[in-house]
Amino acid sequence: MSKEWPLWEVFIRGQHGLNHRHVGSLHAPDAEMAINNARDVYTRRNEGVSIWVVKSGEIAASSPSDKGPLFEPANSKVYRHPTFYDIPEEVGHM
Amino acid sequence: MYAQLVSTEGMKKPEDMTPEERAFQERIDRGEKIEPKEWMPEGYRKTLIRQIGQHAHSEIVGQLPEGNWITRAPTLERKAILLAKVQDEAGHGLYLYCAAETLGVSRDELMERLHSGKMKYSSIFNYPTLTWADMGAVGWLVDGAAIMNQVPLQRTSFGPYSRAMIRICKEESFHQRQGYAVMMKMAAGTPAQKAMAQDALNRLWYPSLMMFGPSDKDSVHSAQSMAWKIKMNTNDELRQKFVDQTVPQARYLGLTVPDPELKWNEEKGGYDFSEPDWSEFFDVIAGNGPCNKDRLGARVKAWDDGAWFREGLVAHAEKAAARRAPIAAE
Amino acid sequence: MPSLPDMTTPDVAELARSAAAHTHHTEIPKPDAGQEAFFEVLLRLGDATLILGHRVSEWCGHSPALEEDIALANVSLDLIGQTQMWLGLAGEVEGKGRSADDLAYLRDAWDFRNLLIVERPNGDFGHTLMRQFLFDAFHFELLKALQGSSDPRVAEIAAKASKEVAYHLERSSDLVIRLGDGTDESRRRMQDALDALWAYTGEMFVADDKDREVAAAGIAPNPESLRAAWEATVRDVLGEATLTIPESTFSHKGGKNGVHTEHLGFILAEMQFLQRAYPGCNW
């Protein structure tokens, strides 16, 4: 079998200035073509104004087995959320 | 459905499960998503590859019966709509192949399995599209049947599959409507157009019912897939839902569903209807449908004829990378 | 009956014109010359995008890779959309109540005004890409000039279309370069395609009386004026693709005047089948 086009992950920034978001993947022989292909595959419905692509194999990811230690400690930090604090109504919006 | 007769391992009782398997099942029961790198039973992985792969193959083989009419569409607008729809199907195939790839199989391998006949695609695409009314009927009935299955699959347990289905359902929303719009024009048109519309319904009704697959209410395979939430409803449930939804739509068009036994059953709150001819279904699955050879032949030809193109681009990318790389490693 | 026009004779334009004048439209009063030339030039634009869009759409479901299938469908969709605009305007300018669909589906081959290159069969994927590149490079220059048209409707359509075509050209030139400078086989196929299509490029830049009349009114450029920029693009891209430009300057002509290759009849037989078999229906 001949060499397969590598897989790329595609990130798109939409019309409203939000961060680039992962939208899916595709195959392409190199980065430049991956961007063109992403334009054709993932922005057919006017979804984006900017495209990032990165080779899937080059993404470093957290390990699923670390899910507990990595993410559960944040559960107990309720004081980081605005609803933790009671502000009297007469103070007005804050 | 697009994934028919996907075989899976028999279902284990909780007491026969390993602790890992039990924890896995509990996560699914809690509604958690399973992500590619996480531990999963081998059966889950294999069944998903088969199911997502078959679904992806159905999308790209499904381009062919409608693609057939792009060059014959009767107006510029219809041509654009049909082309955009068939293009979406290529996109859906692409999303699904990518989802399958997260399970450790490559797209080229899946293509290879399709081309060699090791993997199947939905039986419906082995039926011919003979008149323009078929473009209406395929959108209305075939996409309508597919949506029945795809909407619940957005909640499937495997993260990449679920995300692909969400995107697909969003894009699919115009597919069935454009098909029905074609049917409305035909049914309200000249006597010849109306006859064409009725003929399309006559030919595609039972093949559409077959899309859901034979009854699986007693199947252990289906029970396992449902426990894993990679199958969300039984085939019979979806078929009933499809009939109940479609019959009033046919009536609105002034067309007759080709089933003399069709009648409303007050007690069950749905229609009673005739089963399709399942021997025909198994013939089609076995390769003896009217278009099996043509469909697979077209896919194989596209792939083989395109090999030089894919290889040429890889060769260029390698040359360009070598030119960019510093000449340090000598 | 005169013998069939030989497409290689230089006076093919005259032959086609006289054939056209003798065979049809005789019962309809002749509009003023300016309007007739304007209508003609709009047909040349709309018929080219119609026929090329049709050819490209033939690939749907049969391309070498899914990404390519999707990209080509986008090109075809752009071209169909441009056809609706150009032929819609043509019908308006003609003033006989013909819609874009009437013009696309109810004319015969001799009334089509597209360049011959767009009706060439798809061939292999390399052939399709080379045809696309050679046409895109021309189309891009043409639309750039049309944006300055004295007719605001033309300028508006050209402005929209030129964004689409800028991308078509970027894509097709990129692929021509990659495949020219790819494997031995991809290079050979691209060179074969170039050799086969080269003789259909000259027609892009031949100006006739209608072109000159419309150019004088500032509606559209004289096609001769587009050659230099086209040649520069083509030389650059083909050079980078390591392909050799054929030496021959011979050029097939006739499409702009309704004298086509045999392929157009088959395209129309397929494209117009429903409208012809079931006239007057709503679809």
Image (cartoon, coloured by chain):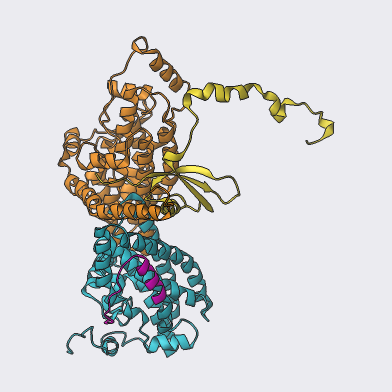
Chain colours: A yellow, B orange, C cyan
Q: Nearer the viewer, residue B137 or C76?
A: C76
Find the magenta span and give its range. C231-251
Q: Quadrant of the N terminus of chain C?
A: bottom left
Residue C105 visible in the picture? yes
Give left or right: position of C242 versus A49.
left
Residue under the image location 42 percent in, 80 percent down? C228
Image vertical order of residue C236 relative to residue B122, above or below? below
Residue at far front of view: B330
Q: Find residue B97 and report its image quarter.
A: top left
Farthest-out residue, top = B15
Provide residue C41's location: percent of width, then percent of height: 40, 80
Q: Quadrant of the C terminus of chain C?
A: bottom left
Note whether B281 is above or below B126 in the view shown.
Answer: above
Q: Is residue B32 visible?
A: no
| Frontmost residue, C61 versus C251 | C251
Residue B42: x and y in percent read 32, 24
